Amino acid sequence: MAAPRKIIIDTDPGQDDAVAILLALGSPDEIDLLGIVAVAGNVPLALTEKNSRIICELAERTDIPVYAGCDAPIRRKLVTAEHVHGKTGLDGPKLPEPTMPLQDQHGVDFIIETLRNAPAGTVTLVPIGPLTNIAVAFNRAPDIIGRVQEVVLMGGAYFEVGNITPAAEFNIYVDPEAADIVFKSGVKITVMPLDVTHKALTSARWIADIKALDTNVGHLVASWTDFFERFDIEKYGSQGAPLHDPCTIAYLINPDLFQGRFINVEIETQSELTLGMTVADWWGVTNRVPNAMFMGSVDDKGFFDLLTDRLARL
Ligand code: BDR
Ligand code: CA
């Protein structure tokens, strides 16, 4: 069996971020989580770093170092998403204050140092919030770009277009300049856009399965899902809620669950109307050089079976 993949999760929890982290922690044969870096996104940084620690404590993994990264996008005012995730970012059942410490080192320095110290091509970055920390790290230390094994991110959309504006997905919209830096960097990129995540919808049957685990993690994941499901069902008229961020980790565990195309993806940074749009050349109508594996579909049954199996281990 191959050695587990070394990853850094860059995140703004967020209930779906929390499930992504739990999926990683439940999969030690495939995933070696080197650390978690929080970024401002769904809620401000003070909450995303705190939520990251709450999640580690829930999984009884206080050995995972948690860092605070950037507290604002590179050039813009922070846009948050309390309307989806609640005031704390992890609304649902009340959670205990974390007691594990936040690391002193800045999250961007942790990313740079980790990539410099590990053999080239052995560390994967998994951003599931705005791309601020990754872009700042690439700008500050361009030597690390060639050392990244892969960036597997949740963000963007093509056929599904947008969720925070009619044209843009939240993570890209919050810091389009950062996304532009990452997509132009030449790093190997795999994208889980809304086109995929809107097909990874929770169902009553899956929530029942998760509750039936009868563990702390199971009950909490079920309650979180109940909480943000209401928003999505009302907004999209969908059957359940999209589990956006866990798609990245599921891809690392079993890439065969996803199908997509290696295409050119550019980020709109100028237009007020379409700011943060991922202009994805899905149909190959330009000669622009492909720079990202842009996923389009998921085996949703396989995805939810994997989640149940791995959450059951926590
Ligand atoms: C993305 O935005 C956030 O609200 C979610 O956590 C996810 O990363 C979906 O657009
Ligand atoms: Ca997120």
Image (cartoon, rainbow, N blue to C red):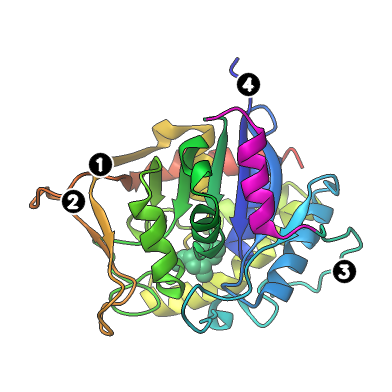
Q: Is residue 115 magenta?
A: yes
Locate the N terminus by quadrant.
top right
Q: Can you identify the residue that label 3 sits on?
A: 96
Q: Are marks 3 and 1 in contact (CB under 8 Å)?
A: no
- Number of the front mark, 3 or 1: 1
Helix, strand or loop at disc 2? loop
Between disc 3 and disc 2, the foreground one is 2
> Do callouts 1 and 2 mark residues in contact (Cβ within 8 Å)?
yes
The quadrant holding residue 5 is top right
Alpha carbon distance from label 1 to label 2:
7 Å
Kind of residue indicated by mark 1 = Arg
- Residue furthest toward the top? 1
Up-down relation of residue 17 to residue 175 (above or below): above
Residue displayed at 54% across by 50% down: 141
Q: Nearer the N terminus, badge 4 or badge 1?
A: 4
**What residue is shown at x 54% (from left), y 48% (from top)?**
126
Secondary structure at numbered mark 1: strand
Magenta stretch, residue numbers:
105-120
Q: Which residue is mark 1?
A: 261
For marks 3 and 1, give the CA distance.
43 Å
Which residue is under mark 4? 3
**Whole-percent x, y for residue 272 in the image:** 28, 85
Residue positioned most to the right: 99
> Local crowd at mark 1 within 10 Å, few (<14), some, or many (≥20)?
some
Q: Is residue 6 left or right of residue 288?
A: right
Q: Which mark is first along the chain, 4 or 2?
A: 4
| Residue at 80% across, 74% down | 94
Q: Rounded to the nearest whole Å, what is the CA distance between mark 3 and mark 4?
A: 34 Å
Q: Residue beneath label 2, please?
A: 282
State the residue in front, 170 or 186: 186
Residues at discs 4 and 1 in contact (Cβ within 8 Å): no
